[in-house]
Image (tube, rainbow, N blue to C red):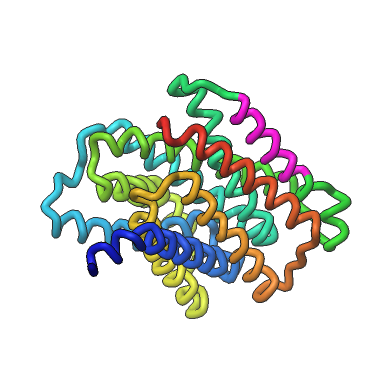
Amino acid sequence: MLIEFFNQNNNSFKKVNLIFASFFFSLMTVCVKKIDNRIPIYELVFFRSLFSLFITSLIINKRNINPWGRNKPLLVLRGILGTIALVCIFYAIRTMPLNISTVIQYTYPIFISIFAGIIIKEKITRNLIFASVTGWLGILIILNPSQLSSVNIELNNLSIVVAFFGSISTSLAYITVKKLSLTEDVFIIIKYFPLISVISLSPIVFLNWVTPNFNDFIWIIGIGLFTQAGQTFLTIGIKKLPTSEAATINYLQVFFGSIWGIWFFNEMININFIMGSLLVLLGTIISTSKMLKKI
């Protein structure tokens, strides 16, 4: 009887895990935005990666896994793409309203669908075209100058470009993870992301070191803790849940980001932002359900 109960509620538990993942990732973005601007973005990424590398290495050692994996070139590429994505995302969070940077970040499933068609020759269907058009229409509504001026927001073009570049890098990293998951242990895939980040950013960080004050250090710890918590809940929740459902639930981060933006940073949203976000969500659901199952 007890086993039957858990089987019936298994999907519900996975959905709860994904809700927690979105919640913790959204808190991570608050920590990034709260840190003093004098601390460089690359230093924040370095600290975040160092924390993740330490935790992941402990898990790998405990499980007696080969720490270097099999497909090293693809693992290194995954780490490079993840590092670029994280630098871009952190930059966007710092230089844009939290709600807008989060919406742009969540265009990555649409880019995944497009790159899956180009890189691994998946068929580009009418549904994918419709999904892309829908998602971009939502972005145009959100980034429309008249809509931004109505809520007293001025966006730097560089910030917008960097935010989209982060989303593109995230999508390419996701495709490499999908390919690596066929041959590599999940913790090896996770490890190479912070490993490459720490190696590549160390010279820049130490040559341009800025010492965090006590408050900054607390927020930096928050970045590490909330990211690790988010990754843990995401890994548990997404394992067997249909990708379209997972994408819908993960989009809760936009909701949380909007709440934190209003609460912590006095950001404003209007009906155009809500309409645009819903269109991006619709495009994400369509593109994810039709393409990611094939990757």
108 is higher (above) or lower (below) than 206 = above
**Residue most toward the front?**
1
Q: Is residue 11 left or right of residue 276?
A: left
Image quadrant containing the N terminus? bottom left
Q: Nearer the viewer, residue 85 or 133?
A: 133
Residue 38 occupies quadrant: bottom right
Q: Residue at x 80, y 54 (%)?
A: 272
| Place of residue 71 in the rendered image (x, y in percent of width and height, measured from the top left) | 25, 32
**Is the magenta region chiefly helix, strand or loop?**
helix
Q: Nearer the viewer, residue 204 or 127?
A: 127
Give the residues in magenta.
126-140
Residue 136 within the segment the image draws in magenta: yes
Q: Is 63 above or below relative to 185?
A: below
Q: Nearer the viewer, residue 201 or 65?
A: 65
Extreme residue in the left direction: 64
Occupied quadrant, residue 70: top left
What x and y, as percent, mark residue 186?
27, 47
Residue 22 percent across, percent down from the top left: 50, 61
Q: Quadrant of the C terminus?
A: top left
The answer to whether residue 52 is visible is yes
State the residue at coordinates (53%, 32%).
113
- Residue 254 percent across, percent down from the top left: 61, 59
Tell me if residue 209 can be seen. no
Is 144 part of what is drawn in magenta? no
Instruction: Give above or below for 186 relative to 265.
Output: above
Identify the residue at horizontal 46%, vertical 56% (top origin): 45
Q: Is residue 139 left or right of residue 194?
A: right
Which residue is at 14% across, 45% downward? Answer: 66
| Number of numbered discs | 0
| Left or right relative to 134: residue 234 | left
